[in-house]
Amino acid sequence: MPPTRARHVVLGFILGLTAVAYLDRVCIAIAAPAMQADLGLSDARMGYVFSAFTFAYALFELPGGWLADRFGPRLMLTRIVVWWSLLTAATGLSRGFLSLFLVRLLFGVGEAGAFPGTARAFAHWLPARERGRAFGLAVMSGVLTGAVTQPLVASLLRLISWRALFGSFGLVGIAWAAGFYLWFRDDPRRHRGVNEEELKLIGREPPRPRGAVPWKAMARSRTLLALCLMYMSAIYGWYFYLTWLPTYLMRARGFGMREVGWLAALPYLGLGAGVLGGGFLSDRLSRRWPARRARRLPGLAGPPLAACAVVGAVLTHDPVASILLFSAAAGLGALAVAPAWVVCLEIGGANAGVVSGAMNTFGNLGGALSPLVVGLWLQRGGSWDAPLLSLAGFYLLAALCWLAIDPERPISPA
């Protein structure tokens, strides 16, 4: 009999997960001007609000990865999506800076572990040769949803308040969580929709008892340390597009709200193309080259070109050219993202959730730093140029880190 295709359903659920995640993350970027006017928030305080989610998300990412390894992705991903959906709705109940800051902080705590849980699900359900593409598709689903969210939110804000907007978006994740929990199983061998031929294709071995997490070996792993620094540098730029870009386009480039709703979506298209292209390229190269070369190439090539595009976007006097160059920078920098997640699976083994959680912790610390730097700089009367040029510096650092990343050296307590 031909193999069943239950693993494709798993991928579909994960695409839905990342889509809902970005729907709930990105809507605040377009709603920010209305929220600032309604709640009386300065640029610095809005920067703190943007960073509250990302900082909490970063701090709890490693525990979230450990929980995914310990209890499995079915329970943990369901819990995560229910939590963040409730906090999305609660964002609309905020009455001032303090309540909004606390809600976004708890939002980050709840969403932490989503991508390590995804990595754990892929490790269980997908053959190794399909994982790069799967990570690329998963992240692409999120950022393309972010692209659609920009004009959608801009249009909805002309019809309803930002408070009602957050409340309605919170319902989407609840529906996803119910469907996922009822259908998904941590072990494909226990799913009625998987036959023996698909199990052979997946290459899934029977679960073995997990030992203690090799914390010391992780701390000594040059590859993991380089991955953490690389991802922090790459996501530093990523979060500018998720937070301050719409405000930049209105204030520095003179676009109106309706135009911003569409133009701010362009970097998301770049991000989607970049993560998908990086995943496909690394999988294709891994069939011909050793993993060390195949996984490194997208990260060595994309970020330096992204740095050049950022410099061009800052220096040009043409507003349209600026947003196009930022979109190109987003895509080129994202080439390194999917290969990095695959390296976590390759070096992490049974502890892939913890390893990927460690990497994503540092990535989101970089993501928390980016909006904070912009907000504080603007509050002090500085121009946009300096914080934007810092994106180029971090892209160059990300490329250098790939020289120390070796997916052929797994982490073990030896």
Image (tube, grey):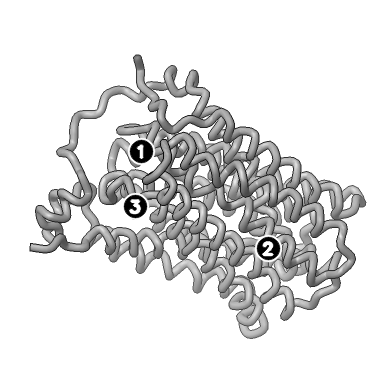
Q: From the image, which quarter does the N terminus lie in?
A: bottom left
Question: What residue is drawn where x is 68% and y is 69%?
Answer: 264
- The residue wearing badge 2 is 327
Q: Nearer the viewer, residue 124 or 79?
A: 124
Q: Quadrant of residue 179?
A: bottom left
Q: Quadrant of residue 163?
A: bottom right
Dot 2 or dot 1: first in sequence order is 1
Q: Residue 187 placed where, x, y %?
A: 20, 47
Q: CA distance from mark 2 to mark 1?
A: 35 Å
Residue type at mark 3: give it: Glu
Residue 354: mark:
none
Q: Nearer the viewer, residue 282 or 376?
A: 282
- The residue wearing badge 3 is 130
Question: What residue is drawn where x is 18% and y is 32%?
Answer: 208
Residue type at mark 1: give it: Leu
Q: Residue 227 placed where, x, y %?
A: 54, 34
Instruction: Give the secondary structure at mark 3.
Output: helix
Tell me whether circle 2 and circle 1 mark residues in contact (CB < 8 Å). Answer: no
Of badges 3 and 1, the one in the foreground is: 3
Q: Quadrant of residue 209?
A: top left
Q: CA distance from mark 3 to mark 1?
A: 25 Å
Q: Nearer the viewer, residue 342 or 215?
A: 342
Dot 2 or dot 3: first in sequence order is 3
Question: What residue is drawn where x is 52% and y is 23%?
Answer: 222
- The residue wearing badge 1 is 67
Of badges 2 and 1, the one in the foreground is: 2
Q: Residue furthest front?
A: 288
Q: Residue 367 placed where, x, y %?
A: 63, 46
Q: Residue 133 placed where, x, y %?
A: 41, 55
Of badges 2 and 3, the one in the foreground is: 3
Dot 3 or dot 1: first in sequence order is 1
Q: For label 2, count other residues whose C-alpha is less than 10 Å away and answer few (under 14), some (14-19) or many (20+).
A: many
